[in-house]
Amino acid sequence: MKQLFDDVSFKCSKLVTKSYSTSFSLAVKMLAPSIREDIYNIYGFVRFADEIVDSFHGYQKEQLIQDFETDYYKALVSGISLNPILNAFQITVKKNNISDDLVQAFLKSMKMDLIKSEYNTKAEYDDYIYGSADVVGLMCLKVFVQGNQEKYDALKDEAMRLGSAFQKVNFLRDLKDDNLVLNRNYFPGVDLRSFDDEAKKAIIAEIDEDFKVAREGIKKLPLEAKFGVFTAYVYYKKLLNKLERTPSHKIGTSRIRVSNYSKAGLLAQSFVTYKLRLV
């Protein structure tokens, strides 16, 4: 019975989300039940692709990401994949009319991580962020507006800015691993070997501007999505504030986190703000 297999596939995507990101999983729980499943399915797909290029050391990453892409398109045509993550994702793509250019842009950025270690121009930086983060936000937006193109077009720019903000915060938080483990530098014009407060301040100012624009978009989201997205926004803003207070040399040598205790407080703060209709 295909429905049973689909249900198992959806549960696998949910498990991937909960296992890899407690923060994102918490935010998804704040979404309306009618859209949670599709967001889990998107996360499962992008997480597996990201893990291939970032974590599967000692394996043929190029072949793995190519097989992942090939198998996805086979699933899209046939309507099924024995890889439950791909099976769940192709269902979400069709259900919400997610355009293939978004999927292709994402996979392009993932493949770039296999061949490119430094981004020297703003154009290269922006192109990578668009594919690795902005389009993921746009996929989620398709779910939030349930495929309504008019609503999608009205919220598209703000959704991209939120995706950009989240990714740039991740870049700053993961500076140590990106530099020392993966030998990557996403920030153009920044020498990670001498990362200083001036460079950090410029990056944070850029992220703050993204967040400012994104917040206006959150206010316009459908009720089913607003609280969950705002919860993620508040978490990442807290993480950014913590990075801002951390000396630049420490960011380059350790991974800054938000404690589980703080996350609980942020959830309460988000709920009060949401109920008072301040967002």
Image (tube, grey):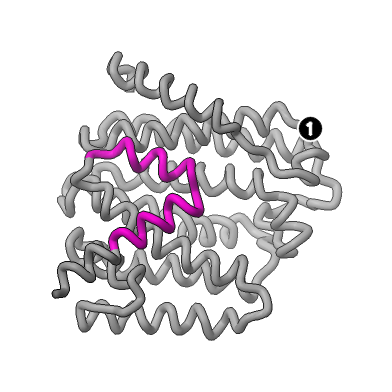
Q: Which residue position is annotated with label 1?
A: 247
Judge whether residue 199 is colored magenta: no
- What residue do we see at 68% from left, 39% from top? 256
Q: Residue at x 47, y 61 (%)?
A: 47
Q: Is residue 161 visible?
A: no
In this view, the residue in front, 233 or 7, is 7
> Could you tell me which residue is drawn at 70 percent across and 62 percent down?
184
Which residue sits furthest top?
Answer: 276
* Principal secondary structure, stretch drawn in magenta: helix
Query: Which quadrant would the N terminus be assigned to in this image?
Result: bottom left
Q: Position of residue 175 (x, y in %)?
A: 71, 49
Q: Secondary structure at mark 1?
A: loop
- Residue span colored magenta: 10-32
Task: Say if residue 244 shows up in the picture.
Answer: yes
Seen in the image, is 102 located left or right of residue 113? Answer: left
Q: Quadrant of the C terminus?
A: top left
34 to 232, vertically: above or below: below
Find residue 215 and report its horizontal and vertical position in percent: 39, 31
Q: Residue 3 falls in which quadrant of the image?
A: bottom left
Q: Residue 141 location in percent, x, y?
A: 29, 49
Query: Of residues 55 and 65, which is closer to you in this image?
Result: 55
Percent of width and height locating residue 36: 27, 47
Q: Quadrant of residue 139?
A: bottom left
- At x 58%, y 70%, the residue is 53
Q: Is residue 243 placed above or below 139 in the rendered structure?
A: above
Residue sitting nearer the eye, 155 or 170: 170
Q: How many numbered marks, from 0 up?
A: 1
Q: Is residue 31 magenta?
A: yes
Which of the two residues, 112 or 36, is positioned nearer the viewer here? Answer: 36
Q: Amino acid at mark 1?
A: Pro
Horizontal side of 75 relative to 24 (left or right) equals: left
